[in-house]
């Protein structure tokens, strides 16, 4: 779907109405930015009614929590320990070449 195609209006029942990107742009440009927000206003949500999250799911997906084995942790620990030992001897390996600091 391109940006100029009609998209369904969020918060309404599916199939009831579609608004094109140009029409939404015209409405946004014609709106008064200083107008107060109505007390019964409903936040825009791509997923429909009743979304109580601060950010919509399409903007920031839920974090994935997966368990990793001991190997990635051991590799990271060896690399970090290696940098600490190199720095402990007063050397620098910032640019990939081992030089005195």
Image (spheres, rainbow, N blue to C red):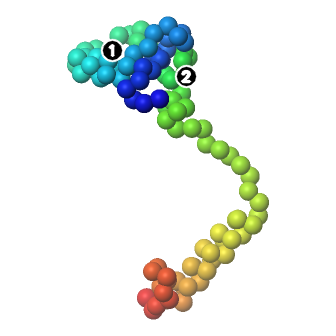
* Nearest to the observer: residue 82 or residue 4: 4
| Above or below for 9 versus 79 | above
| Above or below for 97 versus 79 | below
Q: Mark 2 — residue?
A: 47
| Residue 70 in picture, x, y percent from top left | 76, 64
Q: Is residue 13 left or right of residue 5?
A: right
| Residue 82 in picture, x, y percent from top left | 61, 80
Residue 44: tell me if it is visible.
Answer: no
Q: Residues within 10 Å of mark 1 (few under 14, many from 20)?
A: few
| Above or below for 99 versus 95 | below
Q: Mark 1 — residue?
A: 37
| Residue 78 in picture, x, y percent from top left | 67, 75
| Residue 64 in picture, x, y percent from top left | 65, 44
* Nearest to the observer: residue 35 or residue 96: 96
Location of residue 24 by image quarter: top left
Q: Is residue 3 left or right of residue 13?
A: left
Which quadrant is the C terminus positioned in? bottom left
Q: Residues within 10 Å of mark 2 (few under 14, many from 20)?
A: few
Label whose residue precedes the other's in the sequence (2 or 1): 1
| Residue depicted at x 62% and y 75% | 79
């Amino acid at each position: 779907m391109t940006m100029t195609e009609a998209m369904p209006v969020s918060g309404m029942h599916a199939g009831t109405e579609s608004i094109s990107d140009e029409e939404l742009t015209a409405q946004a440009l014609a709106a008064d930015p200083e107008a107060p927000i109505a007390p019964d206003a409903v936040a825009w949500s791509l997923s429909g009614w009743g979304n109580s999250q601060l950010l919509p799911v399409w903007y920031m997906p839920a974090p994935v929590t997966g368990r990793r084995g001991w190997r990635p942790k051991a590799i990271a620990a060896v690399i970090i320990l290696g940098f600490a030992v190199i720095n402990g001897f007063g050397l620098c390996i910032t640019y990939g070449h081992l030089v005195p600091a």
